[in-house]
Image: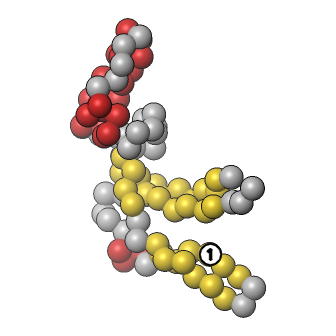
Amino acid sequence: MSMSTYVTGFAPPEGTWQKMKAVWDACGAADIPVPESVISFFGGEPPDSAGVEIKLPVREWHGEGEAGYELDVASIPPQVQVIRFYNSW
């Protein structure tokens, strides 16, 4: 089993995110399917309380016996308030 590392940003859960989350929750409470447009808005995953996921321009970095990612902080969109670094197996 291999491990993958990811870096992603999040904008605060405001406006449209809150409305879509309300639809998601109402459908769950009513035990009815969530509309495809709402599923797509959340990228096919349950809503993340961190907010709207925003892809960040990271690039792989390799050194002698080292590997990781680089993120040019000047390229982070201004609405991003949280950056998540995580591993997945």
Viewer-proximal residue, 16 or 14? 16
User: How many labels sit on residues?
Assistant: 1
Question: Residue at horizontal 58%, vertical 82%?
Answer: 61
Height in image: 23 above or below 8? above
Question: Residue at horizontal 31%, vertical 40%?
Answer: 41
Residue on which disc 1 sits: 68
Residue situated furthest front in the rendering: 1
Q: Is residue 81 visible?
A: no
Image quarter hosting the N terminus: bottom right
Relative horizontal placement of residue 4, taking residue 29 as reference (left or right): right
Q: Pinpoint residue 58: horizontal percent, then vertical percent.
A: 46, 72
Q: Is residue 89 visible?
A: yes
Q: Pinpoint residue 87: horizontal percent, then vertical percent.
A: 64, 56
Relative horizontal placement of residue 70, taking residue 32 as reference (left or right): right
Viewer-proximal residue, 22 or 73? 22
Height in image: 37 above or below 82? above
Relative horizontal placement of residue 32, taking residue 69 as reference (left or right): left
Q: In which quarter of the image is residue 44?
A: top left
Callout 1 crowding tier (Cα within 10 Å): few <14, some 14–19, many ≥20: few
Q: What residue type is labelled 1?
A: Gly
Viewer-proximal residue, 87 or 79? 87
Viewer-proximal residue, 32 or 48? 32
Chosen colour scheme: secondary structure
Question: Residue at horizontal 62%, vertical 75%?
Answer: 68
Relative horizontal placement of residue 26, taking residue 4 as reference (left or right): left
Element at label 1: strand
